[in-house]
Image (tube, rainbow, N blue to C red):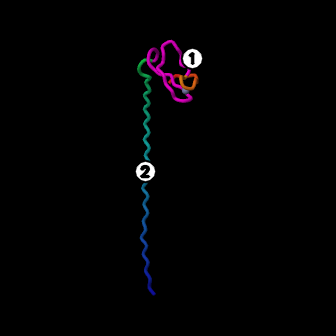
Amino acid sequence: MSGMGQGGGRGQGGGRGQGQGQGQGRGRMGGNASGTGGECRCPNCGYTVPHQVGVPCYQQTCQKCGTNLVRA
Ligand SMILES: [Zn+2]
């Protein structure tokens, strides 16, 4: 009984963890901040209406469910 067992086991663990995190956040609220444009949205059913100038959204009510609208 001559048993020759050759176990050549090489374990090479080359693990490189390079984490390059570049976070460039450019936030521009472009456009018209105040004035025309925008929508008023119903938080209940999602109904939207064009925002009327001079009339805050929360003073308007949804035509479907009557919930006060919020600025979308
Ligand atoms: Zn509604």
Q: Measured along the vertical axis of the image, is residue 37 above or below residue 15?
A: above
**Residue sitting at x 42%, y 75%:** 6
Q: Measured along the vertical axis of the image, is residue 39 above or below residue 54?
A: below
**Alpha carbon distance from label 2 to label 1:** 58 Å
Residue type, numbered disc 1: Gln
Residue stretch in magenta: 33-61
Q: Which residue is mark 1?
A: 59
Residue type, numbered disc 2: Arg
* Label 1 CA crowd tier, 10 Å (few <14, some 14–19, many 20+): few
Foreground residue among 11 and 70: 70
Which residue is outermost to the right?
67
Q: Which mark is residue 39?
A: none
Q: Secondary structure at mark 1?
A: helix
Residue 47's x, y, as percent? 51, 27
**Residue sitting at x 55%, y 28%:** 43
Task: Report the predominant secondary structure element of the magenta stretch.
Answer: loop
Q: Which residue is mark 2?
A: 16
Residue 61's x, y, as percent? 56, 20
Is 59 contained in the magenta span? yes
**Horizontal side, residue 14 vs residue 59: left or right:** left
Residue 41's x, y, as percent? 51, 25
* Label 2 CA crowd tier, 10 Å (few <14, some 14–19, many 20+): few
Foreground residue among 32 and 19: 32
Foreground residue among 59 and 35: 59
